Image: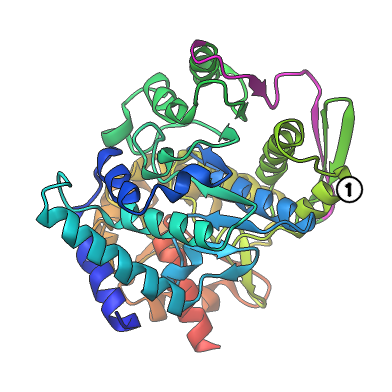
């Protein structure tokens, strides 16, 4: 397939929606000889922070000269962003070649009745990533779970370490309505005897994950279970962190912004510590170097100056609280918030957290079927109506926001990674 044909094919896959389950992906991978079974990997689940932990882990491995595969979702501008080795994205040529191969395989399996239904968009991309990493003989693949864990397509691998970063309410129509139910789904990535790194700081979710690990005989490491093991110090424009584990103290200032990234880095350190015991020894200095060089687009990413324009995909309550804390700590007012969100998210709770932090809120459209319209968001946030403006054109929205902020203020674009991606594309084209 040509790149254009690949885009059309992937767009058509969107109609299959989200289907949780492993039978389909296992059948397709079996037809390729189960390449994932020989692929050393780390599997990372969680409501928030899993993408950042994956990026930090990949950079830690790269700092050791290892060939690290990284599979994440969603992408911001190009689908190839989801699959990379080191800092290099999969090439368009390799992407199209493998996608063509997978498409032909799926058509044959469907013709023979070997698949229950057509694989979804996410399943196809997960298969592509696993084939690519296997083909390129990566030393280790770091895989971000898409949704939940138990029935997520990534959960076909047998990882060296299972990581769960955090648990809060999100995707409740698929994962359950309570924290305990959601934690159980995320704990579905735990495998018998495979170490578990848990970044949840106490509470019901921590108990659920720990109980599941015990049931499966999986060694459990609670990242923040030891009192005083993690400390954060606020400096003028960033944080300095320390984390103690296994008799070693790590001191670091991540390139990634925000207090929460210190905790994400601590989760990555704990995972690296486990890998040192069960796989290869990882050096303390190189671990810190990886943390301080890791970058992750769309997460408190500053893309313009005068005014500062910050992209952050805070799409749920946890993400909104994290973004609000960063605004209060480091952002120069006046703050203008450009906002768009998916209709299946808890719009009211997120807007109640974020909107008070902004002088002006501009609601804009996202060209995606699941997106809430500006009017739908306005209805859920109408108590803030005096500061809200509705503008469907993203270009006009960005121009309006920058003018409102002035040279000394800050524009924050948030609410959905899909909005972040579209804004990143529009700002790049404008430059």
Relative placement, left or right, of 352 versus 306 is left
Magenta-tinted stretch: 215-236
Residue 151 lies, in percent from the top left, at 34, 35
Residue 15 shows up from this direction? no
Relative placement, left or right, of 20 versus 426 is left
- Residue drawn 57% across and 71% down? 405
- Tell me where residue 331 sits by quadrant: bottom right
Element type where label 1 sits in the image: helix
- As displayed, is residue 111 above or below residue 404? above
Nearer to the camera, 429 or 52: 52
- As displayed, is residue 323 above or below residue 409? above
Relative placement, left or right, of 10 versus 287 is left
Nearer to the camera, 384 or 227: 227
Residue 125 lies, in percent from the top left, at 37, 58
- Residue drawn 71% across and 49% down? 329
- Residue drawn 42% across and 72% down? 95
- Residue drawn 38% across and 74% down? 97
Point out the image quarter for the C terminus: bottom right
Residue 234 shows up from this direction? yes
Pointer 1 residue: 285
């Amino acid at each position: 397939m040509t790149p254009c044909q690949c885009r059309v094919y992937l767009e058509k896959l969107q109609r299959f929606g989200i289907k949780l389950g492993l039978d389909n992906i296992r059948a397709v991978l079996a037809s390729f000889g189960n390449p994932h079974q020989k692929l050393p990997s780390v599997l990372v689940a969680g409501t928030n922070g899993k993408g950042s932990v994956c990026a930090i882990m990949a950079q830690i491995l790269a700092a050791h000269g290892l060939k690290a595969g990284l599979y994440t979702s969603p992408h911001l501008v190009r689908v190839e962003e989801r699959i990379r080795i080191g800092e290099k994205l999969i090439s368009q040529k390799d992407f199209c070649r493998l996608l063509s191969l997978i498409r032909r395989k799926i058509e044959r399996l469907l013709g023979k009745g070997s698949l229950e239904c057509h694989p979804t968009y996410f399943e196809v991309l997960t298969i592509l990533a696993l084939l690519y990493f296997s083909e390129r003989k990566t030393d280790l693949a770091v895989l971000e779970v898409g949704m939940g864990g138990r029935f997520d397509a990534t959960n076909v691998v047998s990882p060296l370490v299972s990581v769960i970063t955090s648990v809060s309410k999100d995707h409740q129509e698929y994962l359950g309505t309570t924290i305990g139910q959601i934690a159980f789904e995320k704990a579905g990535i735990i495998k018998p005897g495979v170490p578990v790194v848990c970044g949840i700081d106490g509470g019901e979710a921590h108990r659920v994950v720990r109980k599941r690990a015990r049931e499966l005989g999986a060694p459990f490491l609670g990242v923040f279970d030891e009192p005083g093991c993690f400390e954060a110090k606020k400096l003028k424009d960033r944080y300095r962190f320390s984390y103690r584990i296994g008799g070693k103290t790590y001191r670091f200032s991540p390139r990634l912004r925000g207090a929460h990234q210190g905790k994400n880095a601590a989760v990555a350190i704990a995972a690296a510590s486990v890998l040192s015991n069960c796989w290869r020894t990882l050096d303390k200095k190189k671990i810190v170097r990886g943390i301080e060089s890791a970058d992750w687009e769309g997460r408190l990413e500053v893309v313009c100056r005068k005014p500062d324009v910050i992209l952050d995909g805070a799409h749920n309550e946890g993400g909104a609280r994290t973004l609000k804390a960063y605004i209060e700590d480091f952002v120069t007012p006046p703050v203008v918030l450009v906002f768009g969100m998916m209709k299946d998210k808890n719009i009211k709770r997120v807007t109640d957290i974020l909107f008070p932090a902004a002088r002006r809120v501009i609601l804009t459209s996202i060209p995606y079927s699941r997106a809430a319209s500006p009017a739908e968001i306005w209805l859920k946030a109408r108590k803030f109506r005096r500061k809200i403006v509705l503008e469907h054109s993203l270009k006009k929205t960005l121009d309006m926001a920058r003018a409102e902020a002035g040279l000394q203020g800050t524009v924050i674009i948030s609410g959905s990674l899909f909005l972040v991606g579209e804004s990143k594309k529009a700002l790049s084209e404008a430059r």
